[in-house]
């Protein structure tokens, strides 16, 4: 009997609010309508709670200016307690997701109405194992809170909220989009909380695997923001060959014609960065770090264009390159140095003479026999062959 009464009450509420056609104007004129909905977030009848949450959720999504109404009546609504209780209640994933979205959206758009302690409390609930939100619901809430600069550090201090750990091939488009949206928001900060290499690897993976337009567009937006503002990411973009990945997108079929223009613009920006990175100064910066890695500036094209510049400053760059052979803690650096020294010998007219003066041959021969790293042994062997042979170009041709 009680269940029937609850059901009848719920259907009466649905009919009443459907007839009221709740919108910004009606809410502004009669805040009691909004308060009734918020009070029902924790209604005993799960259907009534779902309806109330969906109503306010749709209201916020349909008209961004409605936040001004909430700002005026926030203290009377007790939205924080009601939403938090709805998330904790675990009546359904639907209710938890909608309650988390409503509360986080208000935090992101009306930050003055919430204290840091309240935001921390909400984030603790989201982070808890017992949280009833779906992965998508949690991501939506995190993105909403990140929109408020006042609370951004509270979110970024927890790695689980801003992780790029997702598989672009298997993740749902919604999850991939939101993960990239988080990256896009953080790209406007002075420094990224992610390593540049990780960021570029994930963007490359997404742009290679995903063909969902909104995900691809968000990936391009991330690049658009990162390239001019984060030089380490821009360098990685070139090193990891994103130019070819972005150019390949032009040959896909997209429904939105504007996406082709965005792809072309991004290809042009990366091409400009490639041209900037192909200079000798970039190579010297990497030498200065003492750590070498495979990439664009260690290609034969670089050596054919820049080998004579090694004569500058009393062969300073060549001496630094020879010193990289002593970096036994980093096998990749040693392997790249062997490759580059071999390229120098075959490209510069005085290559063998300068290499001999630095004692490179003896170091390289020791590496051939005294290291357990296959990559280092292989590159050391090739380097030694180039040092000992007079006409390496003829050997390559043969």
Image: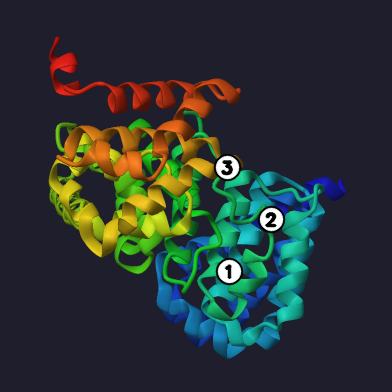
Along the line of sight, the residue nearer the viewer: 278 or 246: 278
Gap in angstroms between the C-alphas marked 2 and 1: 27 Å
Residue 60: image x %, image y %? Answer: 49, 68
Residue 139: image x %, image y %? Answer: 58, 53
* Residue 213 in view of the camera: no
Q: Which of marks 1 and 3 precedes in the sequence?
A: 1
Determine which residue is flagged by label 3.
165
Residue 97: image x %, image y %? Answer: 63, 53
Task: Using the image, tell me which numbered label, if any, was put on residue 219.
Answer: none
Q: Which of marks 1 and 2 precedes in the sequence?
A: 2
Instruction: Name the residue located 27 percent from the left edge and 64 percent from the top edge.
Output: 313
Gap in angstroms between the C-alphas marked 3 and 1: 20 Å
Q: SS class of the residue under badge 1?
A: helix
Task: Using the image, tell me which numbered label, if any, was put on residue 48.
Answer: 2
Determine which residue is flagged by label 1.
145
- How crowded pointer 3 is (Cα within 10 Å; few <14, some 14-19, many 20+) is rated as few
Along the line of sight, the residue nearer the viewer: 272 or 306: 306
**Does the residue at mark 3 contact the one at mark 1 (Cβ under 8 Å)?**
no
Q: SS class of the residue under badge 2?
A: helix
């Amino acid at each position: 009997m009680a269940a029937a009464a609850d059901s009848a009450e719920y259907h009466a509420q649905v009919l009443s609010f459907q007839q009221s056609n709740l919108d910004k104007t009606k809410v502004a004129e009669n805040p009691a309508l909004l308060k009734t909905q918020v009070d029902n977030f924790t209604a005993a009848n799960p259907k009534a709670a779902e309806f109330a949450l969906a109503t306010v959720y749709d209201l916020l999504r349909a008209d961004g200016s409605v936040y001004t109404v909430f700002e005026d009546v926030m203290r009377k609504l007790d939205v924080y307690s009601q939403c938090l209780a709805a998330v904790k209640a675990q009546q359904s994933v639907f209710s938890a997701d909608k309650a988390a979205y409503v509360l986080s959206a208000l935090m992101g758009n009306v930050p003055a109405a919430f204290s840091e302690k309240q935001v921390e409390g909400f984030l603790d609930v989201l982070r808890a194992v017992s949280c009833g939100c779906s992965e998508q619901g949690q991501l939506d809430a995190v993105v909403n809170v990140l929109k408020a600069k006042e609370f951004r550090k509270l979110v970024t201090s927890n790695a689980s909220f801003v992780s790029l750990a997702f598989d672009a091939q298997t993740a749902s488009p919604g999850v991939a989009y939101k993960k990239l949206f988080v990256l896009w928001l953080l790209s406007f900060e002075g420094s990224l909380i992610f390593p540049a290499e990780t960021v570029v690897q994930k963007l490359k993976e997404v742009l290679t695997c995903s063909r969902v337009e909104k995900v691809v567009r968000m990936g391009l937006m991330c690049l658009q923001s990162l390239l001019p503002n984060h030089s380490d990411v821009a360098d990685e973009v070139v090193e990891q060959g994103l130019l070819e990945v972005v150019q390949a997108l032009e040959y896909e079929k997209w429904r939105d014609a504007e996406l082709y223009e965005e792809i072309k613009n991004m290809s042009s920006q990366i091409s400009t960065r490639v041209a900037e990175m192909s200079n000798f100064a970039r190579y010297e910066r990497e030498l200065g770090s003492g750590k070498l890695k495979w990439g664009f500036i260690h290609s034969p094209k670089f050596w054919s264009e820049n080998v004579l510049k090694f004569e500058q400053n009393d062969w300073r760059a060549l001496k630094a390159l020879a010193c990289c052979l002593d970096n036994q803690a980093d096998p990749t650096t040693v392997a790249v140095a062997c490759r580059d020294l071999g390229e120098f010998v075959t490209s510069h007219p005085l290559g063998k003479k300068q290499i001999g003066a630095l004692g490179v041959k003896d170091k390289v021969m020791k590496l051939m026999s005294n290291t357990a790293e296959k990559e280092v042994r292989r590159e050391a062997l090739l380097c030694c062959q180039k040092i000992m042979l007079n006409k390496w170009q003829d050997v390559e041709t043969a």
